[in-house]
Amino acid sequence: MQLRCEFFARKTQNIDQAIQSGDVNGTIQYCAKKQCCVGIFELIDGHFRPDLLGCSLFETPCPDTTCSASTHVDNYKKCLCSSDFCNTNITWSSETKQSQPPNPLSNGKVGLSDTAVILFIILGIWMILVLLVMGYKLMPHLRRCGEKAASSNKGWTSQCSGYISAMSDIDMENMKLQKVVACGRYGIVWQGSYQGNVVAFKLFPVKNHHEFTRERAIYALPLMLHAGIAHCLGAGRAASGEPVLVLKLASHGSLNSYLSKTIITWRDAVRLSKSLAEGLAYLHSDLYSNGVHKPAVAHRDLSSSNVLVHADGMCSLCDFNCATVLRSCGGLGQWQCQSSTSQDPVQLGTLCYMSPEILDRSVDLSSGYCLLQGDVYALGLLLWEMWMRCSDLFLDLAVPEHQLPYEAELGPKPTLEQLFVFVSETRGRPVIPSTWSKVPQTNNFSLQEILEDCWDHDPDARLTAHCAAIRMASLPTEYSL
């Protein structure tokens, strides 16, 4: 059985070497070679902060099941251990403890009095009761969900400064372009080789440097390594001066291209749907791990051209040129987001995937919650787009050719005005075939209900990405009537 270690790399240049020791899924690394977790910590401002966590690359004995930090050298401490996630539970030396901030409850001489402790307990109970009452009042506005929904996100706004992230440039001297695999609005994607590996190069024209900077910043956010998000290996400049992102190559290309050429089975559809929903839920999540923070991110241009399909049949999100970073600026529910590249919300995103509130310009761009729920609307359309190419959902009928949302109703290139009338005014949605009702329901949710709960006209009535991922996880792998 593979050892599991907490994974974190504070420096981008450490990631490539670290992932050689095992597969990474979010903050978890599955050790491929050595049954040993490692933790490396750097002394910063008088406190030891995680620098690298994961599986050990080297043949080093680690008989201990817990991580005991060694004496530090050059402001670094290191520990090794041999049990699952042991590198998150560190035993510090006395020297290290002195450098840590004092804990007022750890010593009776400086601790709180019994009376103060009782007051804190009473206050804590009171706060829990208040939160329970607030949650009860919010329940009618939330869709059914097997896990908690992020209802507090409704207060996200866009007035404070954006999240600052960094990614070191890499040497592009050995970059070799082979063939064009995709052409986007802001750049061209090439298949090529870099340091002996087959990769994808996304080249941006110099005039689109702003979009390159925005996308690079999203990939450089902490804790962005996840199977549902495209893996960025680094960034740099081509010899011609064009900004370049180096990405892990997806063998099947975009979801749009894949569906255009491939009729999928129900098993394929479930695998694609689950990974897509999980990737979006992770992108939307607000995470803290080992002292680092991954803020929630709204994609804002979710379409089948901006989703990749890998050899294992899994999806990952890509193309974050329009993405917006959300961050907390003052407590529970007080969320803010980085300003968009345009004051006109219609200019961001692909027309046929835009939510009704974006199309009719009623959305408040300062509302991060609206941006996230716009992504969920697009998720519903993507699920419909995938399932329309599933042979098991059409029984003995011919599977339709691949079509984009609203292509059957409005043609291949609908205008903003056409979409506004059909989607916003008449509240039209893509047709759901009657044969889909025969698919076994799970947790009392039919495929039609899942779609309708994602693309509901009212953003407050839509599922969150988290709830959508839970529903996808409940879909049966095997199809049977």
Image (cartoon, grey):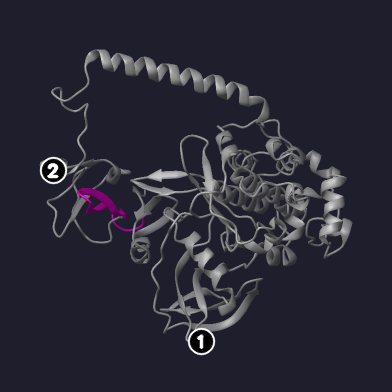
Image coords of residue 45 (percent x, y): 22, 51
> Is residue 50 a member of the stretch shown in magenta?
yes
Name the amino acid type tagged 2. Ser
Please provide the residue range marked out in magenta.
31-54
Q: Nearer the viewer, mark 2 or mark 1?
A: 1
Whole-percent x, y for residue 356 in the image:
77, 48
Q: Secondary structure at mark 2?
A: loop
Between the C-alphas of marks 2 and 1, the distance is 52 Å
N-terminal label among 2 and 1: 2
Number of numbered callouts drawn: 2
User: Circle 1 sits in a helix, a strand or a loop, which is it?
Assistant: loop
Q: Residue at x 84, y 62 (%)?
A: 414
The disc labelled 1 sits on which kind of residue? Ser
Label 2, on which residue? 93
Left or right placement of residue 358 versus residue 397 in this view: left
Q: Nearer the viewer, residue 435 or 317?
A: 317
